[in-house]
Image (cartoon, rainbow, N blue to C red):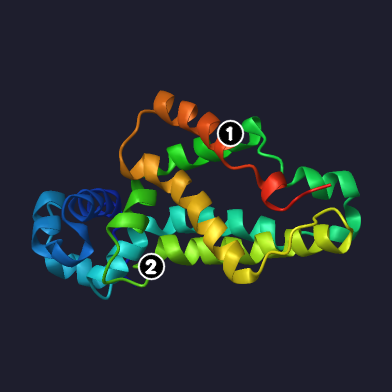
Amino acid sequence: MSVRDTSIDPKLLQSARAEFMKHGFIKADLKTICEKAGITTGAVYKRYKGKEELFCAVVKDTANTLDNFVSVRTQQEFSDMTDEQVRNTWDMNEGFMLDLFRILWDIRGDFVLLLEKSAGTVYENYGHDFALRMTEAYMQYYLEAKKRGLAKADITKEEMHVLCTSFWTAIYEPFIHKMTRKEIEEHCRVVCRFFDWTKALDMK
């Protein structure tokens, strides 16, 4: 039984990542990817069904990291939380936000691929879909705060989606515009001042 040669995988993914970043998925050329990786197109098709599956392989780890981020926030057991803890989830804590930006900084290349270069793939609406998933999480926290009498404002799911989209766009854009890490850290502080969730929800 032949053993699959995995030695070309890093070169292939590196070449594909560069081509997708430069041209986007639709205009990326598989032949160019292969030439720069020093392999044949046949070697690619032994590993992936086509260009889209190759794109998915490039962004897989980043997509999983972000999926885990969402999962942690949508699987909260509110019965274990005090009123103060529920309320604190809405505070724009600079330390927490800086940690979030640092996570995104470490995956910034593939994050931009998902946001800006994925048209034509299953990820083509990634930014919108991510904000939609976070809306579900935010609504859970809001409804819990409302049930406990901590939030006084009446927020519909549609309104929460608009707010979440605005909030996450403010987080996406620095990476799309290639801000430096120092610029992003300062931007984080601006975001913390600009988005006051406790006021939006009229928190007690």
Q: Does 56 sit left or right of 186 as displayed? A: left
Relative to 53, is 195 above or below?
Answer: above
- Secondary element at tag 1: helix
User: Would you say residue 91 is visible in this rendering?
Assistant: yes
Mark 1 or 2 closer to N-term? 2
Q: Residue furthest bottom?
A: 49
Q: Is residue 77 visible?
A: no
Query: Quarter holding the N terminus?
Result: bottom left
Kindly identify the residue that appears in the image at 22 percent across and 63 percent down: 25
Confirm or deny contact between disc 1 and disc 2 (CB under 8 A): no
Of 75 and 165, the residue lying toward us? 165
Residue 95: x, y in percent?
64, 30
Q: Residues within 10 Å of mark 1 (few under 14, many from 20)?
A: few
Left or right of residue 123: residue 30: left
**Image point 8% across, 54% down: which residue?**
35
Q: CA distance from mark 1 to mark 2?
A: 28 Å
Residue, x 29% and y 54% (percent of image)?
9
Determine which residue is flagged by label 2.
Answer: 125
What kind of residue is marked 2? Asn
In this rendering, the answer to whether 88 lies above or below 130 is above
**196 is higher (above) or lower (below) than 60:** above
User: Could you tell me residue 137's position as x and y percent?
Assistant: 66, 62
Depth order, front residue of 203/120: 203
Viewer-nearest residue: 32 or 200:
200
**Label 2's element?**
loop
- Residue marked by disc 1: 193
Residue 173, quarter of picture:
top left
Instruction: Give the amino acid at mark 1.
Output: Arg
